[in-house]
């Protein structure tokens, strides 16, 4: 089973790039973030013609997530409230950032974690609250019996200093590297989820996002913030995890590039 994650930074702007990549990728499930389109306007047709089922949760101009799959989804859920209930989730589903479904027995949880804005801003504290709700969501998903989980997406967090071109200290106050964010992510992963990429590559300097400015891609001044996390049996069954930089080289690309994991389900 091949699962990929990709922040496309507007699906309508990048639909040709995504379509062409899908045509050559043979992925079973593609998780998209930052689709930036309301559901009725999502460009389904190019992807359905490739044989994919399309499931979306979007909003105008911001955020948005989608799942493309070779097989129909089972137990599709959108946001946190489908699992935790609206009273618990409160305002944290207003932004469209989570969609999940089961494919071939694997629960695929596709996430667009808030960026966080500036350190100690309202957006930063929203990000920490959102990550706290994600922890409850994962805990409840496991309690409901979904033992094989692939949690993936744009996490807007570099887990450690290998994942950013220039290491930062807490004194730098760079959002995406702050201890509170890394600790909040670690609290989610403590349920038994592990970073598929780090199973196969321990070196730094390998990134999935590069700023459009200052020739960041050409200079490889990037961050690794697009992740695929697997529960133990899936982690052991993973046979590869790779970042494909080729789409980032195309004209008018997303600032992110796809990351794919392959899992031998037997």
Image: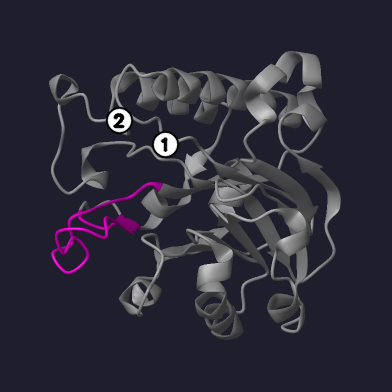
Where is residue 110 shown, x and y percent of the image? 62, 47
Earlier sequence position, callout 1 versus callout 2: 1
Q: Quadrant of the N terminus?
A: bottom right
- What residue lies at 49% left-to-right and 21% top-to-bottom? 126
Callout 2: SS: loop
Q: Does 113 lie within the magenta span?
A: no
Q: Is residue 262 visible?
A: no
Q: Quadrant of the C terminus?
A: bottom right
Q: Provide the residue designation for mark 1.
A: 115
Which region is colored magenta?
Answer: 205-225
Query: Mainly helix, strand or loop, the magenta region?
Result: loop
Q: Are marks 1 and 2 in contact (CB under 8 Å)?
A: yes
Q: Provide the residue designation for mark 2.
A: 175
Where is residue 213 shown, x and y percent of the image? 20, 58
Q: Is residue 216 visible?
A: yes
Q: Does 222 lie within the magenta span?
A: yes
Q: In the shown orientation, is residue 119 left or right of residue 104?
A: left
Where is residue 236 shown, x and y percent of the image? 55, 51
């Amino acid at each position: 089973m091949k699962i990929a994650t990709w922040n496309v930074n507007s699906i309508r702007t990048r639909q040709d790039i995504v379509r062409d990549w899908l045509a050559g990728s043979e992925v079973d499930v593609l998780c998209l973030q930052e689709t930036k389109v309301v559901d009725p306007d999502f460009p389904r047709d190019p992807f359905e013609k490739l044989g994919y089922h399309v499931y979306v949760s979007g909003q105008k101009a911001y955020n948005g997530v989608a799942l493309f799959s070779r097989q129909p989804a089972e137990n599709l859920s959108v946001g946190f409230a489908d699992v935790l209930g609206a009273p618990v989730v409160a305002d944290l589903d207003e932004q469209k950032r989570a969609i999940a479904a089961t494919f071939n027995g694997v629960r695929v949880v596709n996430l667009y974690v808030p960026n966080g804005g500036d350190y100690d801003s309202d957006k930063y504290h929203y990000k920490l609250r959102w990550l706290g709700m994600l922890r409850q969501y994962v805990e409840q998903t496991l309690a409901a019996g979904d033992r094989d989980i692939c949690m993936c997406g744009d996490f807007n967090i570099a887990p450690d200093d290998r994942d950013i071109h220039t290491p930062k200290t807490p004194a730098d106050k760079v959002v995406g590297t702050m201890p509170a964010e890394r600790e909040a992510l670690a609290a989610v992963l403590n349920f038994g989820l592990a970073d598929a990429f780090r199973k196969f590559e321990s070196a730094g300097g390998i990134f999935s996002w590069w700023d459009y400015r200052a020739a960041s891609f050409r200079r490889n001044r990037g961050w690794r913030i697009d992740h695929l996390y697997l529960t133990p049996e899936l982690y052991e069954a993973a046979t590869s995890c790779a970042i494909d930089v080729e789409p980032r080289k195309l004209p008018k690309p997303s600032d992110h590039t796809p990351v794919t994991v392959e899992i031998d389900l037997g």
